[in-house]
């Protein structure tokens, strides 16, 4: 129960890695807000995970929506110990010059602007308490980019740099900031990463992962729970590779 008594917000928490993180947090004693653009899915996940969780609709690319999320969390919990910036999207594998402006804007708004918006909203609260843990869900794409996922790669590279600069600035205020870098997993984004979900494409992708399997929501939850717990009190500014050796 390494998160006993902690409160957390997990964006994109209704499915995939976010749901895995929310599940492990709840299992370890945290009260968790499952914040997602899909309100029905957030409610269903909260029902599944039990009384320690609550659902909240949020569009992480919209400042007013992020503010409402933070107000709801503070109203329900009284304070927020942990913020997990998990919500993310990608474009389909496409030559960089062929990605539409609309897709580019959407990727940057959800993957990049959201981190600014949640920080703007919740960092002052954490500063007032002299403590807090922020976890950004980046990607191996930000460390070892693959062709045709160009602007998605760039958004995750930005997130890793943002993690480090947030960490060095916020450390004197008692706030730790880390990132995890998963490889692709069994989530709604898998097909978009691969372009098509066929046995051949899966075998090709898995051949690049030394441990021979995709990341799972449980993997992400375990890593996130550690980094956001007091057991990691000396860890800040790291981008932990949870990727089965993909980046070696």
Image (cartoon, grey):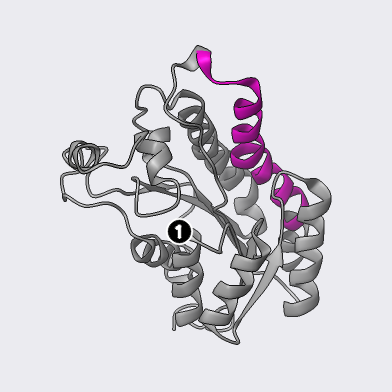
The residue sitting at the bottom extreme is 51
Q: Position of residue 39 (x, y in %)?
A: 67, 64
Q: Is residue 85 left or right of residue 187?
A: right
* Disc 1 crowd, CA 10 A, few/some/many (<14, 14-19, 20+): many
Q: Look at 15% across and 45% down and name the residue there.
A: 210
Q: Position of residue 40 (x, y in %)?
A: 65, 67
- Range shown magenta: 98-122
Query: In terms of depth relative to the viewer, which is nearer, 10 or 90?
Result: 90
Q: Position of residue 131 (x, y in %)?
A: 64, 65
Q: Which residue is mark 1?
A: 16
Where's the C terminus, which quadrant?
top left
Query: In terms of depth relative to the viewer, which is nearer, 114 or 81?
Result: 114
Q: Is residue 65 left or right of residue 39?
A: right
Q: Is residue 219 above or below residue 112?
A: below
Quadrant assignment, res 127: bottom right
The number of numbered badges drawn on the structure is 1
Q: Is residue 7 visible?
A: no
Where's the N terminus, which quadrant?
bottom left
Q: Is residue 61 above or below residue 135?
A: above
Magenta stretch, main secondary structure class = helix
The residue sitting at the top extreme is 97
Q: Is residue 110 left or right of residue 96?
A: right
Q: Look at 66% across and 26% down and name the residue there.
A: 102
Q: Is residue 174 above or below residue 212?
A: below
Q: Look at 63% across and 73% down and name the residue there.
A: 43
């Amino acid at each position: 129960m390494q998160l006993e008594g902690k409160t957390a917000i997990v964006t994109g928490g209704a499915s995939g890695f976010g749901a895995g993180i929310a599940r492990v947090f709840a299992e370890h004693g945290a009260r968790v807000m499952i914040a997602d653009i899909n309100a029905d899915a957030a409610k269903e996940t909260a029902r599944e995970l039990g009384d320690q969780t609550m659902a909240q609709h949020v569009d992480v690319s919209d400042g007013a929506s992020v503010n409402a999320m933070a107000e709801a969390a503070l109203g329900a919990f009284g304070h927020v110990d942990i913020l997990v910036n998990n919500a993310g999207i990608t474009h389909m594998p496409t030559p960089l010059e062929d990605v539409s402006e609309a897709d580019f804007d959407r990727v940057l708004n959800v993957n990049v602007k959201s981190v600014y918006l949640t920080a703007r909203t919740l960092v002052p609260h954490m500063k007032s308490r002299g403590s807090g843990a922020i976890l950004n869900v980046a990607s191996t794409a930000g460390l070892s980019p693959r062709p045709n996922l160009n602007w998605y790669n760039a958004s995750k590279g930005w997130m890793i740099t943002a993690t480090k600069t947030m960490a060095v600035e916020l450390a004197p205020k008692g706030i730790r900031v880390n990132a995890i870098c998963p490889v692709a997993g069994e989530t709604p984004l898998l097909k978009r990463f691969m372009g098509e979900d066929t046995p051949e494409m899966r075998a090709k992708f898995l051949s690049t992962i030394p441990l021979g399997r995709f990341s799972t929501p449980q993997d992400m939850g375990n890593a996130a729970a550690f980094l956001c717990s007091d057991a990691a009190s000396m860890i800040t500014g790291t981008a932990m590779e949870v990727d089965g050796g993909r980046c070696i």
